[in-house]
Image (tube, helix red, strand yellow):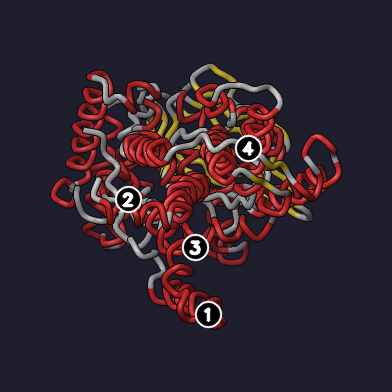
Amino acid sequence: MMLEIAGLTRRYAGLVAVDGVDLAVAPGSVHAVIGPNGAGKTTLFNLISGVVAPSEGRIVLAGQDITALPAHARARLGMARTFQNIRIFAAMTVLENVLTGLHVRLRAGPLGIVARLPGFRREERAAAARARVALDMVGLGPRAEDRASALSYGDQRRLEIARAIAQDPRLLLLDEPAAGMNPAETEALGALVRRIRDLGTTVLLVEHDMGFVMDLSDRVTVLNFGRRIFEGTPHEVRGEPAVIEAYLGAKVAARLARRA
Amino acid sequence: MPAWLDDLLWTYQNVVYALGINGLLALSMYVVLAVGQLSLGQAAFMGLGAYSSALMTLKLKLPFFAVLPLSCVVPVLFALAIGAPTLRLSGIYLAIATIGLGEVLRAVYLNVGLFGGALGLSGIPNRAETWMIYGLLGLAVLVLFLVGRSGVGRAMEAMREDETAAEVMGVNVRRYKLGALVASAVLAGIAGCLNAHVSSFIGPNEYGFEPAVTILSYVLLGGIGSPVGPVVGAWVLTLLPELLRGLADLRGVVSGLIIVVAVLFLPNGLLPWRMRRRGA
């Protein structure tokens, strides 16, 4: 498995945000996590990426236990993520944002940097070339030299994705990538996610747009009140009463079941 | 050198020294602010550099070319001791711990015989030359520029803007913070050494809270878009009192007013230009 999570729990005072969640993400797949607001999806992502420490449980990335590793070490092991509330570096240019995503690939030491040794220059040029490839992939190539804060909302989301894929991650976490996008943009995003997967990156995503999720995902995990209530293919999830109940409430679910 | 320039330099020798040394101090503050941290220990680091270097010169009779580089050893040790525990915590703790450091050190200078008590240390030979001060200032600006235009500079700016996002990109945020504090201690320590060796006297009250705030205001006025900003800020604030000398008693009022107006209307400093972050 690319990612294996066992009994992952995060308690806050008076609230269990994530409660004993198990999850296995197959390499080369697109795996979605869905659930109503407050189900613990973003906390789960924060636990996986190391932004938040778990109260209990284990996280294994490609066979290596990463539960105790800080976020920057997880990035080095090939994990990248985007954020639900966009977190680009606003004062930087678009290209500099993506170059920052390439941080883990830079090797030049202090001497190389200060003396501008050939190795450092080569590395910087290679990084810039790589960053431009990532920008072209999300369609932001022509905006490379603009200030990141000058981008539209949808473009800032795309920039976050470019910054993450520039890391060439094994596992890419996308936190609500389609939020605030119009149908055309969402469709383009779906095509982009497929391309990312085809290039060998496993994708784990949280999303509210059900059409997007059902279209794209190989497996879907459903969370409610911090617990995993179901996991299956998009087709199985669509017909599962427990899932309908979680979203629509028991009464509506019962009425729907009678009618079916 | 023409006679008039020689005259001018001689008359304003102390201002010339102060411009260079305060530029170094501004850079020492800039390095920390550049990673999004607030430290008020620059004056304390400067004091450690000044006292330790003065003692090396007076008691150990070391030559100045050895004293100058060694002057950053003690400040760096203190930076590590104070940074390691406080940088795990969020923002304000470093500021408070460094204020504390300044006050504790002041009490130590006042009460330990070795440091001369309230009289301070006097009779320090004037061994720092103008060319040394400006050479080091130029070198510091150049190195900070080169580092700023590399992956390290990008990581630093990323941390300042969004620590969590930077960490997720693989930036070891804590190591960078500690590194910045150590670099800051080196710059302040050397500035302290230069200061001690141009003024022949140092006292315990030169390195407390007030000079720390003055150093901070250099950077706030100059801006942190590039290493040139803080130096410009230091020069303006060092020259202002000299230029306003004619105003006599109103000097403090006018110079304070100028700072307030500058901060209100130039939130990015006098030099808002932001350096680019690419090395090739």
How many residues crowd around disc 2 within 10 Å: few (fewer than 14), some, or many (20 or more)?
few
User: Is residue B231 positioned above or below B156 on the image?
Assistant: below
Return the residue at label 4: B124
User: Is residue B207 positioned above or below B66 on the image?
Assistant: below
Q: Secondary structure at mark 2?
A: helix
Return the residue at label 1: B248
How many residues crowd around disc 4 within 10 Å: few (fewer than 14), some, or many (20 or more)?
some
Mark yes or no: residue A239 visible.
no
Q: How many numbered marks does the figure carry?
A: 4
Kind of residue sitting beneath label 3 = Arg
Q: Are marks 3 and 1 on the same chain?
A: no
**What is the spatial separation of the Cα atoms under label 2 and label 3, in whole angstroms?**
100 Å
Q: Quadrant of residue B243?
A: bottom left
Residue depicted at x 35% and y 63%: A180
Q: Is residue A195 left or right of residue B52?
A: left
Residue depicted at x 45% and y 75%: B244
Kind of residue sitting beneath label 1 = Ala
Return the residue at label 3: A259
**What is the spatial separation of the Cα atoms under label 3 and label 1, in whole angstroms?**
91 Å
Q: Are marks 4 and 2 on the same chain?
A: yes
- State if disc 3 and disc 2 touch (CB < 8 Å): no
- State if disc 4 and disc 3 touch (CB < 8 Å): no
Q: Quadrant of residue A69?
A: top right
Q: Earlier in the sequence, mark 1 or mark 2?
A: 2
User: Between A88 and A247, which is closer to the camera in this rendering?
Assistant: A88
